[in-house]
Amino acid sequence: MTLVVLVFSLALHALTFFVLVRFYSHVQNVKEESRQLHGMREDLEEILRQYTEEIKQENQELKDSLHSYADQNAGSAAAHEAPAPVEKDPQPHAFQKRAEEAVEHAGTKEAEDSFSPPPPPDEDQMETSNQAKVLSLSARGYTRDEIAKELQIGKGEVDLFLKFYLELQ
């Protein structure tokens, strides 16, 4: 009987030792992953900081070029000169290209004054809603029955429209 208890105890000790070793290795893996994630986070923060600084610098350059363009236009309103060339990076970003194109293609004050908008396209006819018609006829002094007959809707609908309108006021 003691032999069975001794074997059982040894088996439990071995199982406990095995579980502790597995737990320890799992904890070590989690710590290593945590260190890696911390390093990746720091790298990402550095990349984002650099990107933000780059964007700020590009914004400042764009702002300076727009100010110089505005000053140049203010100084020579009669002359239609091209804007001063802007320093370009070997590969400027898309938004920087668009901003430079906008500066290059911006018209003078005279061109803006002579602009007339294109004629509006054939506009769709807008219909007044039944609610607006009911309120309009009610304001003119029509009774509930006359409004219902005029608009060919039920008296209950007219009552509802008027009731909701009065509640909103």
Image (spheres, rainbow, N blue to C red):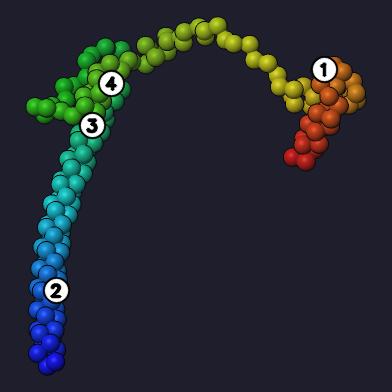
- Residue furthest bottom in the image: 2
Where residue 96 is drawn, which disc sits there? none
Can residue 68 be seen at all in this image of the molecule? no
Eye-nearest disc, 3 or 2: 2
Where residue 62 is drawn, which disc sits there? 3
Say which label, 3 or 2, has the lower sequence index. 2
Q: Residue at x 13, y 76 (%)?
A: 15
Q: Residue at x 21, y 39 (%)?
A: 55
Q: Which residue was labeled with disc 2?
A: 19
Eye-nearest disc, 2 or 1: 2
Relative image position of residue 49 (x, y in whole percent): 18, 48
Q: Secondary structure at mark 1?
A: loop
Where residue 102 is drawn, which disc sits there? 4
Disc 1 to disc 4, C-alpha distance: 56 Å
Q: Secondary structure at mark 2?
A: helix
Say which label, 4 or 3, has the lower sequence index. 3
Where residue 152 is drawn, which disc sits there? 1
Q: Quadrant of the N terminus?
A: bottom left
Give neighbour class at mark 3: few <14, some 14-19, many 20+ (Cα, 10 Å).
some
